[in-house]
Amino acid sequence: MVSPSWPTHWREGAFKGSSVALVILGMIGLAVACAVLALVAYIIIDPPILSKLMHSPVNLPVTAVLVVQLAFELPPIFVLMAMLPRISLYSWEELGLRLPPASALWYVIGGFVAAIIVGDGGSVIVNHLSHHPHHMQDVAKIFENIRHTPAIIAFILYGVVVAPIAEELIFRGFLFNLGMRYGNFWVGAVFSSLLFGAAHGDIELFLPLTLVGFVLATVYYRSKNLIISMLTHASFNAIAFSSLLWMKTH
C-alpha cells in the first residue's frame, strides 16, 4: 500500500528500496568509521584515555564523549541532507524544513507537555516496576560528573541544540516519511518511534523514549514542519537538563 497523504501524493519512485538501503548502509558505515577515527585520534593525543575506556565509557572525559558523538552523528547528517531529496523526490522545504508560521508554535507547547507526560511519567512507571529502581541513564551519569566544570556548557548545548536537530532530521525527516511512503501515519510513527527509542541504547527507558518519539512524530505530522518538531525536542531536552541541575543542587 502506498500512502498518498504526506506531504502530498507521493511520486512514483519515491523511497525506492535499493536507494533507501544504500543511504542507510552509507550513513551507518560513515557514522561508525568517523566515530572510530575520532576515538583513535583522541587516544593518540591522550593515551591514558584508553584505560578509562576499557573500564567504563561513562568515565571518559566529556570532551572525548562529545567529539566521538559529533563524529558519529554529523557526517551521516550531511549525507542525509544531500540524499533525502533524491530518494524522496521532495525537497527538504517540501518535507517541512522551513520557517514555521507563528501559529504553529502552539504545536511546540502541546507537544512539549505531551512529551513530558509520557516521557517522565513513563520513566516513573518503569522505575517503579523495574528491578533497578535507581537506574540512571549514562547521560545523567556523565552530567553528574561534569556539573561543576565548564564542560557542562558544551554538553548542554549538544543536548539542547545539536541532538534535536540531528535526530529530527533522521527519525522524523527520513524514517517517519519512509514509513508513511509505504503505509500511513501509524506505520511511520510507530516505525520511527521504535527506532528512536532503541537508538538511545537504554533498555530500561526504551518505552518512555519510544513514546516521546511518537509525540514528536505527531507534532511533525500535524504541523508539517520539521523546525516545530526540533523545537519541541529541544524544549523536552532542556527541561530534562534543568531537572538534573535542580536535583543535584537540592
Image (tube, helix red, strand yellow):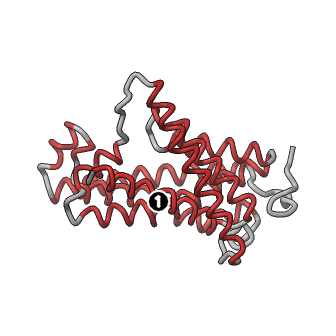
Q: Which residue, as the protein is rendered here, is positioned at the far front?
A: 250
Residue in the picture at 55% in, 36% down:
207
User: In the displayed structure, does residue 132 sit left or right of residue 4?
Assistant: left
Numbered circles on residues, count: 1
Question: Which image quadrant: the N terminus?
Answer: top right
The residue nearer to you, when weighing 124 against 97, is: 124
Q: Is residue 30 above or below residue 128?
A: below
Residue 81 image position (x, y, % from top left): 59, 67
User: In the displayed structure, does residue 217 sit left or right of residue 38?
Assistant: right
Residue 147 image position (x, y, % from top left): 24, 57
Q: Is residue 104 above or below residue 22?
A: below
Numbered disc 1: secondary structure:
helix
Residue in the picture at 72% in, 47% down:
188
Residue in the picture at 33% in, 61% down:
155
User: In the displayed structure, does residue 145 sit left or right of residue 179?
Assistant: left
User: In the displayed structure, does residue 75 sit left or right of residue 49?
Assistant: right
The residue nearer to you, when weighing 55 against 228, is: 228
The answer to which quarter of the image holds residue 4 is bottom right
Q: Is residue 99 above or below residue 168?
A: below
Crowding around mark 1 (Cα neighbors within 10 Å: few <14, some 14 to 19, many 20+) is many
Residue that badge 1 annotates: 163
Q: Which residue, as the protein is rendered here, is positioned at the far top?
A: 131
Residue in the picture at 70% in, 77% down:
101
The residue nearer to you, when weighing 206 against 109, is: 109
The answer to which quarter of the image holds residue 91 is bottom right
Residue 128 image position (x, y, % from top left): 45, 28
